[in-house]
Image: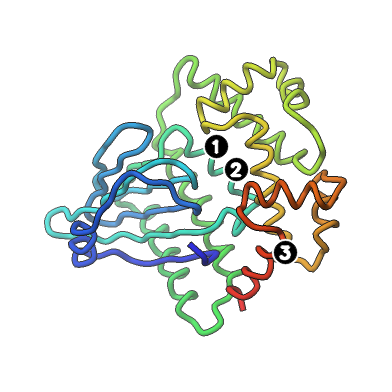
């Protein structure tokens, strides 16, 4: 996906077209949020398949192997599909990873709380249809949507049990500490010490939950912020690299190219063309 943000609606007719197209398990380079108003979603993720009836919310992080098949139910289907790049809301993206790591799919009640989620989708869609759509407005609406999803979900959550709860709390604490320190040139040991545990155990928890090592998660957070700064500021490549703990421009450029597949300059030029 080349766009920073994209939103569209699926109805029963669109679902029939999707059913005829190949749909194998895959990864994508964007985040995907589905708000299911009616119909159902057959979702293969985390090496298992499950069918969830609407009302539903499904969030899949980039790089996670999955296959989503929207389906009609009682002849109806109405789903909002939102796709966006991590750098579109860099300040909240890792909070989303923390919240959705245990379950990509959430069932909801058809109440006022859920209907407010749908209203926000309609507002974002309406803004994107305007000539010269204001992405700042869309970004704020998307952040609000995630806050409201979490609020509604917590009202229905059951208490976690045993080791899973301990790992979940540790992972969330790690992401919180990371958010406060990712601009510093700190490694795994720094975060492990902050959490009063060994580097090995912290790595095991991160691998279990996000299928990434601590170092990979740190680099991913730096990359998301680098992309955000490249899009939203006129800072030089060197300034951005230094702000994120890279003392040499060449090293920062090499790390960026390895993870993003292009240089910081090429990414900035490409995004500016898209935004304009």
Residue at 78% across, 26% down: 190
Q: Which residue is mark 1?
A: 98
Q: Please tell me the numbered disc located at residue 94.
A: 2
Residue at 46% across, 59% down: 83
Asked if marks 2 and 1 touch (Cβ < 8 Å), the reply is yes
Crowd band around label 2 with a 10 angstrom C-alpha radius: few (<14), some (14–19), many (20+): many
Name the front one of labels 3 and 1: 3
Q: How many marks?
A: 3
Residue 232 pos. (x, y %) = 71, 66
Residue 240 pos. (x, y %) = 80, 55
Residue at 52% across, 65% down: 2
Residue 45 pos. (x, y %) = 35, 38
The front one of 214 and 39 is 214
Q: CA distance from mark 2 to mark 3?
A: 25 Å
- Position of residue 119 relative to residue 39, above or below, is below
Q: Please tell me the numbered disc located at residue 265.
A: 3
Element assignment for label 3: helix
């Amino acid at each position: 996906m080349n766009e920073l943000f994209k939103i569209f609606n699926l109805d029963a007719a669109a679902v029939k077209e999707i059913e005829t197209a190949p749909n194998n398990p895959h990864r994508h380079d964007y985040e995907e949020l589905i708000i299911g108003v009616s119909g159902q979603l057959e979702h293969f993720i985390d090496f298992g398949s499950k069918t969830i009836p609407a009302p539903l919310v499904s969030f899949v992080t980039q790089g996670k192997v999955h296959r989503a098949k929207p389906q009609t139910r009682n002849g109806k289907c109405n789903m909002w599909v939102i796709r966006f790049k991590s750098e579109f809301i860099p300040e909240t993206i890792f909070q989303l990873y923390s919240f959705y790591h245990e379950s990509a799919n959430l069932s909801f009640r058809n109440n006022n709380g859920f209907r407010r989620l749908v209203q926000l989708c309609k507002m974002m869609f309406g803004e994107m249809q305007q000539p010269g759509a204001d992405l700042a407005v869309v970004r704020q609406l998307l952040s609000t949507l995630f806050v409201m999803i979490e609020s509604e979900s917590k009202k229905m959550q059951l208490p976690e049990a045993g080791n899973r709860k301990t790992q979940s709390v540790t992972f969330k604490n790690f992401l919180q500490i990371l958010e406060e320190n990712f601009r510093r040139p700190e490694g795994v040991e720094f975060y492990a010490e902050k959490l009063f545990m060994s580097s090995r155990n912290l790595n095991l928890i991160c691998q279990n939950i996000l299928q990434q090592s601590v170092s990979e998660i740190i680099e991913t957070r730096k990359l998301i912020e680098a992309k955000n700064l490249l899009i939203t500021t006129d800072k030089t490549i060197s300034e951005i690299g230094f702000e994120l703990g890279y003392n040499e421009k060449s090293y920062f450029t090499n790390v960026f190219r390895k993870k993003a597949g292009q240089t910081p300059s090429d990414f900035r030029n490409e995004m500016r063309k898209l935004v304009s």
